[in-house]
Image: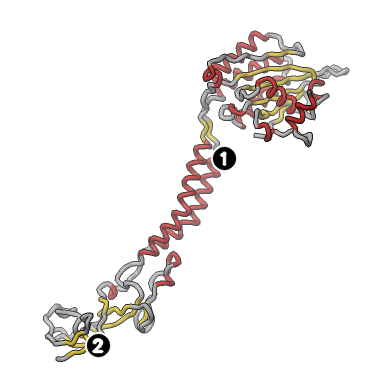
């Protein structure tokens, strides 16, 4: 039976396989000689204005003083003379695509980072809730005290403490004392023995705190004692890794002070000390710092895209009042009032002073473009 049970727990390799079982986990332990231990399971003027290249979209926006495929001719006035520029976009408007692209790229960085931050902060703040395993089943727990060593001096007081701990936390303490040989003869280490005891005694009830204490008196009078904690998986929000470590250290310290505490008194005092502590809200400062740092890194990487996307685009002032000019033939004429030169067929009044302009007769094509000036 023992060999079959070991194969079930440790696997065919003979190694203890907690991942296969996913039942209880070690809370650490200690000994008279070794101290406590914690478990690890747990432009213009001859050049061209090409617009803004922010967000990688600038290369698709082009202006030139010579026509090119896909371009539109725009007419603008500067220094009382007409000028033409060719562009494949509306030179009067800002590059909306660049802005949108900058925001999209920034959001691609920040939205996952924000959700990760929220998730991380929620995980870093632990608010313990009392376990209701037995209440949900309509049962009351049994408080296991099994003293094969005969070292527990007041089992009645110990059981009272165990009951109070359960009523506050929903975690059921259990205490077993055995000879060292109980685990040294058949197990590689005490943690494996404690695990086996938990599985055999409590089965799938993941709400127990099992304390296994063992001892052996050497010929020289040395009390070679050891202990191991085994916790059900449902207790992880109450016995966090830090609380488990603190509990383990406190119990080990009391067991070492045998002049002040008996074994059962050390266990009772530790349970009483941690009964209110394990139900307090805890904040994992290290985790918060880590997640804030990750969010900060994502912000630094994504922010330049947002800045470039939202950066005001400098559109030349003369481009703001530019007009698409589809005239096949271009004729110029000076205003009789201000002398400013304008393009015939593009205006009904002088673009400089607003005065009426000389009427003309044109020959237009099917699209309405002026193709010839008659007079």
Q: CA distance from mark 1 to mark 2?
A: 74 Å
Q: Nearer the viewer, residue 36 or 108?
A: 108
Circle number at residue 364: none
314 up-or-down from 363: above or below: above
Count of numbered circles on the image: 2
Q: Secondary structure at mark 1?
A: helix
Q: Quadrant of the C terminus?
A: bottom left
Q: Nearer the viewer, mark 1 or mark 2?
A: 2
Does 306 sit left or right of 214 as displayed? left
Q: Which residue is mark 1?
A: 286
- Displayed quadrant of residue 307: bottom left
Q: Residue at x 59, y 14 (%)?
A: 163
Does 184 sit left or right of 144 as displayed? right
16 up-or-down from 144: above or below: below
Q: Which residue is mark 2?
A: 329
Q: Residue at x 34, y 69 (%)?
A: 314
């Amino acid at each position: 039976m023992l060999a079959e049970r070991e194969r079930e727990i440790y696997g065919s390799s003979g190694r203890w396989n907690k991942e296969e079982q996913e039942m209880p986990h070690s809370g650490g332990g200690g000994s008279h000689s070794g101290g406590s231990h914690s478990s690890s399971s747990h432009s213009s003027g001859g050049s061209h204005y090409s617009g803004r290249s922010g967000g990688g979209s600038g290369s698709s926006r082009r202006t030139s003083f010579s026509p090119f495929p896909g371009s539109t001719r725009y007419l603008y006035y500067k220094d009382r003379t007409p000028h033409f520029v060719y562009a494949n976009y509306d030179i009067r408007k800002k590059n909306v695509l660049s802005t949108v692209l900058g925001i999209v790229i920034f959001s691609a960085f920040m939205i996952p980072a924000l959700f990760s931050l929220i998730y991380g902060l929620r995980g870093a703040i632990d608010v313990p809730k009392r376990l209701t395993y037995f209440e949900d089943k309509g049962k009351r727990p049994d408080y296991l005290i099994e003293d094969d060593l005969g070292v527990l001096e007041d089992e009645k007081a110990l059981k009272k403490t165990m009951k109070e701990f359960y009523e506050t936390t929903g975690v059921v303490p259990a205490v077993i004392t055995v000879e060292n040989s109980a685990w040294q003869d058949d197990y590689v280490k005490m943690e494996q023995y404690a695990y086996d005891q938990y599985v055999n005694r409590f089965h799938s009830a993941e709400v127990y705190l099992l304390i296994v204490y063992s001892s052996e008196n050497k010929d020289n009078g040395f009390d070679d004692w050891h202990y191991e904690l085994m916790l059900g998986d449902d207790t992880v929000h109450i016995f966090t890794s830090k609380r488990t470590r603190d509990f383990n250290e406190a119990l080990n310290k009391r067991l070492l002070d045998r002049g002040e505490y008996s074994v059962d008194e050390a266990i009772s005092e530790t349970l009483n000390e941690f009964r209110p502590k394990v139900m307090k809200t805890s904040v994992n400062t290290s985790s918060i710092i880590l997640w804030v740092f990750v969010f900060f890194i994502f912000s630094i990487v994504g922010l330049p895209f947002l800045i470039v996307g939202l950066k005001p685009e400098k559109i030349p002032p003369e481009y703001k009042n530019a007009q698409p000019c589809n005239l096949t033939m271009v004729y110029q004429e000076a205003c009789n009032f201000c002398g400013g030169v304008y393009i015939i067929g593009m205006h009904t009044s002088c673009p400089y002073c607003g005065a009426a302009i000389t009427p003309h007769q044109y020959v237009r094509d099917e699209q309405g473009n002026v193709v010839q000036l008659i007079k």
